[in-house]
């Protein structure tokens, strides 16, 4: 049976057993009559005959200039009725624009050997569902930089699957607690990293305050390594207490200064570690050649490398800082620090520390390093009008001379750390903060010199400055001295509303 009966003037017709169809005063068939779209789905109108260079008009969409017929389209008529009449006239006469287009189309070379891709018209005919629309909107937002805010404790963006797994495993080790049987002590300040770095999440601040001590004589700093080092541990294991009758490490008698140290956040430390030395040196001005009163200079480790970690900016690399913390804070030896600290320069009594050294292996140390390295800087909170005004004032009164708002990392084998700009609010340099804040020396840092504190997750801080002496941000600003005296005085001279605006900005960090 010939199913292509001459019922439809548009496509030749494929009538059903009921015969041909009548639509809008002309015969039509199911193949070219527009289907009623399902709710929530918009489909392009399919036509069997389509003029070259013209796209099908979407159902319910806006008409283009090429959809208008001469004299318009009657109400209720098919959207392409006028065009169809011109097509039919062109078929009969064999002339006119339609015929010329068809003849022109036949002159095009064949492309049978070229691989066929998907037609743009076929792509347009795909259903546009709400899910696809949402996905497209999400891509647009991402392209515009509208990314999900990073919360305290979140990992860096762009970590691969292996790195995310190592971050999760390292977090478990960071949050674990040591005992004497697993390597704790015999001198220690805490039983685990997470015991101190705990608020608002692991990797954050703590309310513990440590004691440090050094000797500064004739402009030379002595870290008192021969007397047990500059970190004075506040606790001992039961075995050590029984052997020597002490509850903490004795304060070294040759120390000339004592310091208190609060527990800082470790968010963004991997990014700080990835900042090239050249960037840090570019901000240095030890001789104040620009006469702005700011003369930042780098601290240097014993081998000459530029330091960046610790309140005095003495330790140059993050993995070294973490390995030292295992030993000095928990008494846990590791492949980087294989021996226990002495007790005031005296050896540990036999039998007090039964665990073989090193007490953690390289794999455990590497996982802990991965967790700390991959911790991101929390996204600053959205600013209101006062906060935006405070940000302007932060720059105007000179705070940005030391608290550089953004730093950029250099090359790194880790893509998530490579060439990344991040909110640091530090120059990683030493600055003289005046005699009122002075305590110990360390490396090249004199008692009154401190590394610029990164203003990271400042909104969750309850105590401020290196020793936690101030309980409000306003007090902390007013405590600045030395090179920061100018910025402090300009802050004091601000009207109360502007001072409040600047504090509101700081609380957004």
Image (spheres, grey):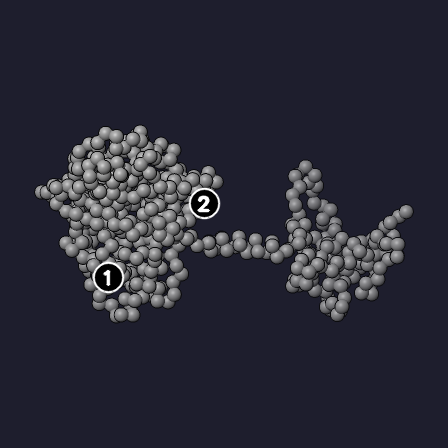
Q: Residues within 10 Å of mark 2 (few under 14, many from 20)?
A: few
Residue at screen point 81% across, 63% down: 23
Of circles 1 and 2, which is in front?
1
Observer-nearest of 344 and 255? 344
Measure how far apart labels 1 and 2 are at the Cα level: 38 Å
Residue at screen point 35% across, 32% down: 361
| Element assignment for label 1 | helix
Q: Where residue 320 sits: x, y (%)? A: 29, 37
Q: Where residue 503 sits: x, y (%)? A: 30, 63
Q: Report which quarter residue 227 is drawn in.
A: top left
Observer-nearest of 233 and 440? 233
Q: What residue is pinned by disc 2?
A: 158
Badge 1 vs badge 2, beta-carbon distance below 8 Å: no
Lateral position of residue 98 relative to residue 246, left or right = right
Lateral position of residue 412 relative to residue 257, left or right = right
Q: What residue is pinned by disc 1?
A: 475
Residue 119 visible at all: yes
Question: Relative to residue 189, is residue 364 depicted above or below?
Answer: above
Q: Report which quarter residue 486 is drawn in.
A: bottom left
């Amino acid at each position: 049976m010939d199913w292509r009966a001459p019922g439809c003037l548009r496509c030749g017709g494929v009538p059903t057993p009921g015969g041909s169809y009548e639509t809008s005063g002309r015969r039509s068939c199911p193949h070219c009559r527009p289907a009623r779209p399902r709710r929530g789905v918009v489909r392009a109108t399919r036509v069997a005959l389509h003029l070259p260079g013209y796209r099908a008009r979407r159902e319910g969409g806006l008409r283009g200039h090429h959809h208008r017929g001469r004299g318009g389209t009657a109400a209720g008529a098919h959207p392409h009725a006028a065009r169809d009449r011109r097509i039919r006239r062109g078929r009969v006469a064999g002339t006119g624009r339609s015929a010329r287009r068809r003849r022109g189309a036949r002159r095009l070379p064949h492309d049978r050997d070229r691989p066929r891709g998907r037609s743009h018209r076929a792509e347009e005919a795909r259903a546009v569902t709400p899910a696809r629309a949402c996905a497209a909107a999400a891509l647009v937002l991402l392209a515009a930089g509208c990314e999900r805010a990073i919360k305290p404790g979140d990992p860096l963006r762009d970590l691969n699957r292996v790195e995310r797994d190592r971050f999760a495993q390292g977090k478990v080790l960071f949050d674990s607690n040591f005992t004497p049987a697993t390597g704790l002590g015999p001198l220690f300040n805490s039983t685990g990293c997470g015991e101190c770095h705990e608020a608002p999440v692991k990797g954050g601040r703590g309310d513990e305050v440590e004691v440090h001590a050094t000797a500064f004589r004739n402009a030379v700093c002595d870290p008192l390594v021969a007397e047990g080092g500059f970190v004075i541990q506040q606790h001992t294991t039961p075995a050590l207490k029984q052997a020597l009758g002490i509850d903490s490490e004795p304060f070294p008698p040759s120390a000339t200064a004592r310091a208190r140290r609060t527990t800082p956040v470790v968010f963004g430390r991997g990014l700080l570690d990835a900042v090239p030395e050249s960037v840090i040196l570019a901000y240095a001005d030890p001789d104040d050649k620009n006469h702005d009163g700011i003369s930042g200079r780098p601290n240097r480790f014993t081998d000459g490398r530029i330091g960046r970690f610790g309140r005095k900016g003495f330790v140059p690399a993050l993995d070294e800082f973490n390995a030292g913390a295992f030993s000095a804070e928990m008494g846990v030896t590791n492949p980087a620090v294989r021996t226990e600290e002495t007790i005031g320069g005296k050896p540990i009594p036999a039998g007090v520390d039964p665990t073989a050294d090193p007490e953690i292996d390289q794999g455990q140390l590497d996982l802990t390093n991965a967790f700390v390295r991959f911790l991101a800087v929390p996204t600053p909170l959205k600013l209101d009008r006062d906060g935006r005004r405070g940000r302007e004032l932060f720059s105007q009164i000179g705070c940005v001379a030391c608290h550089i708002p953004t730093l950029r990392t250099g090359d790194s084998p880790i893509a998530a750390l490579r060439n990344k700009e991040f909110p640091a609010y530090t120059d990683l340099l030493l600055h003289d903060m005046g005699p009122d804040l002075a305590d110990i020396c360390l490396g090249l840092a004199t008692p009154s010199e401190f590394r610029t504190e990164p203003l990271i997750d400042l909104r969750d801080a309850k105590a401020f400055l290196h020793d936690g002496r101030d309980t409000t941000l306003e007090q902390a600003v007013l405590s600045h001295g030395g090179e920061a005296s100018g910025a402090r005085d300009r802050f004091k001279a601000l009207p109360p509303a502007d001072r409040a605006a600047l504090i509101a900005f700081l609380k957004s960090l």
